[in-house]
Every structure is written in structure tokens, then in C-alpha cells.
């Protein structure tokens, strides 16, 4: 399993637009094949910075989502709201 973390810095005037968009698509993303969970996190200091935190069965599942029409539509609508370019990391748990 991998975790995908995406940091998004929005124009303050567009935070509500993003929250409405996320609310309308979150269940579709959670229902995408291979998605094992999705959370939206808010920075406690900067009210226009949000993170998505999602879990995927594999990198192949994440890539299938990133190549899907759903992702393309959501990302097109989301990125126009940014103050800064998004940052993203794919990570996995380290076990000892």
C-alpha cells in the first residue's frame, strides 16, 4: 500500500470553491478502484493550505486514477484555484 500526500495552497478567495468541489467528488474518489481511503486535512495556521491524504493498494492503482477522466476533470477545476503550485509525495510506511 502507498500513501499519496498532496499539499495545495489556494488563493484565499477560492478556498470555499475548493471545499465545495471536494465535497462533490470525495465519494467518487474513495470509490475508485484501489483507493483505500481519502482524507482532507487543513493547515492549522494557514487557512488557505490543504492536504489530501489518500491510501492506494499500489502505485499502479494510483496511476490509473491519475490517468482517469475523473482525475483530469477534478484537477483541471482545482489547479485554477491555486496561489502556488501543488506539491505531491508518494510514500510508504517503513517497518522495522
Image: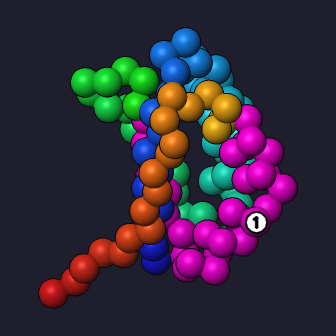
Q: Which residue is mark 1?
A: 67
Report whether 93 appears left or right of 34. left
Res. 73 image quadrant: top right
Q: Nearer the viewer, residue 55 or 9?
A: 9
Name, please, the residue furthest toward the bottom.
96
Please report the residue visible at 69 percent of the width from the left and 56 percent of the height from the top.
31
Name, please, the residue furthest toward the top.
13
Q: Is residue 33 above or below residue 53?
A: below
Q: Nearer the viewer, residue 57 or 13?
A: 13
Q: Is residue 77 above or below residue 16?
A: below
Q: Secondary structure at mark 1?
A: loop
Report whether 34 appears left or right of 13. right
Q: Nearer the viewer, residue 29 or 85?
A: 85
Please report the residue visible at 42 percent of the width from the left and 24 percent of the height from the top.
48
Secondary structure character of the magenta stretch overall:
helix
Q: Is residue 95 visible?
A: yes
Quadrant location of the C terminus in the rendered image: bottom left
Q: Is residue 25 above or below residue 67?
A: above
Q: Position of residue 78 (x, y in %)?
A: 66, 36
Q: Is residue 40 visible?
A: no
Please report the residue visible at 46 percent of the width from the left and 57 percent of the height from the top.
88
Q: Position of residue 40 (x, y in %)?
A: 47, 40
Q: Is residue 59 magenta?
A: yes
Please report the residue visible at 30 percent of the width from the left and 75 percent of the height from the top.
93
Res. 57 image quadrant: bottom right
Q: Position of residue 10 (x, y in %)?
A: 50, 28
Q: How is the image coloured?
A: rainbow
Provide the residue span drawn in magenta. 50-77
Q: Is residue 53 magenta?
A: yes
Name, please, the residue furthest toward the front.
84
Amino acid at each position: 500500500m502507498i500513501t499519496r500526500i498532496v499539499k495545495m495552497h489556494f488563493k484565499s478567495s477560492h478556498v470555499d470553491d475548493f471545499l465545495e468541489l471536494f465535497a462533490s467528488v470525495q465519494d467518487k474518489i474513495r470509490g475508485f478502484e484501489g483507493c483505500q481511503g481519502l482524507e482532507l486535512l487543513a493547515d492549522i495556521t494557514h487557512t488557505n493550505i490543504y492536504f489530501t491524504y489518500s491510501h492506494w493498494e499500489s502505485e499502479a492503482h494510483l496511476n490509473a486514477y491519475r490517468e482517469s477522466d475523473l482525475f483530469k476533470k477534478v484537477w483541471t477545476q482545482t489547479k485554477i484555484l491555486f496561489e502556488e503550485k501543488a506539491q505531491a509525495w508518494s510514500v510508504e510506511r517503513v517497518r522495522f
